[in-house]
């Protein structure tokens, strides 16, 4: 009986520590990557603003070729949506909607991941050195979701490489003549 009490005290102490530490962790997380492309913003913008074109260079498209995609009509500009369904755990199910489209400067997207929350993505196209510096930023709010706050500590490490791969694929798509 003494062992059970000790076990329960330790367990409750661990839960209390988890909660207390979690309350002091950031309530949001951000990932950002940038890459220079040797084409003007006018050449880059359509590859991001049209969700059908976005899918062609998205790093998650390569992970599961069996992913099912659905697009709104039109598939570009404010209000355009894309939904996906995948059995692969790195892709999962979700949706993306363009909520901001400022030709040829900026595109904002709202993302929802089934069962995992969501966030916003922002692409900014900055003319630079006879080309475009593309900034890709993702922000997620965790609120009082304590496991989410812990995951936020790993957000950059987990998503950063996907962003780098995606920007490299976008660069290849934009800079390769058709």
Image (tube, rainbow, N blue to C red):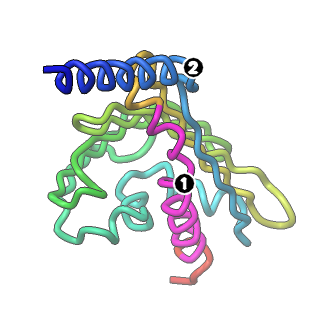
The quarter of the picture where the N terminus appears is: top left
Secondary structure beneath label 2: helix
Residue depicted at x 22% and y 46%: 93
In-front residue for pair 70/17: 17
For marks 1 and 2 on the same chain, the one whose residue lies earlier in the sequence: 2
How far apart are the two marked residues, 1 and 2, measured between alpha carbons?
20 Å
Q: Which residue is mark 2?
A: 24
Mark toward the viewer: 1 or 2? 2
Q: Is residue 171 above or below residue 93?
A: below
Taking 123 as reference, is 128 above or below it? below
Residue ID at (58%, 45%): 31
Side (left or right) of 174 relative to 72: right
Left or right: residue 5 versus residue 43 is left
164 drawn magenta: yes
Residue 177 position, x and y percent, is 57, 83
Residue 42's quadrant in the figure?
bottom right
Q: Is residue 81 magenta?
A: no
Q: Name which residue lies at 36% across and 62% down.
A: 60
x and y percent of residue 77 in the render?
A: 45, 40
**Residue 102 in which image quadrant:** top right
- Compared to 17, does 62 lie above or below? below
Q: Label 1, on which residue?
A: 157
Write the start and end of the magenta stretch as one range: 150-172
Mark 1 element type? helix
> Left or right of 122: which side holds 66?
left
Image position, residue 57 (x, y; %): 44, 67
| Position in image of residue 68 (x %, y %) | 17, 58
Compare residues 107 and 118 and report the one nearer the observer. 118
User: As drawn, which residue projects farthest toward the front?
Assistant: 2
What number of labels is visible?
2
Q: Nearer the viewer, residue 13 or 128?
A: 13
């Amino acid at each position: 009986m003494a062992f059970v009490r000790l076990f329960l005290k330790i367990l409750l102490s661990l839960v209390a520590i988890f909660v207390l530490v979690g309350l002091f962790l950031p309530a949001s997380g951000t990932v950002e990557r940038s890459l220079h492309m040797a084409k003007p913003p006018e050449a880059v913008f359509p590859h991001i603003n049209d969700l059908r074109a976005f899918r062609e260079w998205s790093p998650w498209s390569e992970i599961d070729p069996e992913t099912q995609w659905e697009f709104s009509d039109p598939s570009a500009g404010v209000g355009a949506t894309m939904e996906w369904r995948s059995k692969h755990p790195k892709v999962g199910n979700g949706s993306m909607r363009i909520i901001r489209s400022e030709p040829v400067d900026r595109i904002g997207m709202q993302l929802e991941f089934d069962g995992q929350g969501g966030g916003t993505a922002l692409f900014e196209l900055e003319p630079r050195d006879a080309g475009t510096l593309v900034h890709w930023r993702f922000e997620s709010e965790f609120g009082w979701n304590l496991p989410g706050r812990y995951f936020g500590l790993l957000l950059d490490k987990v998503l950063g490489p996907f962003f780098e791969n995606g920007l490299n694929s976008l660069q290849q798509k934009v800079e390769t003549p058709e």
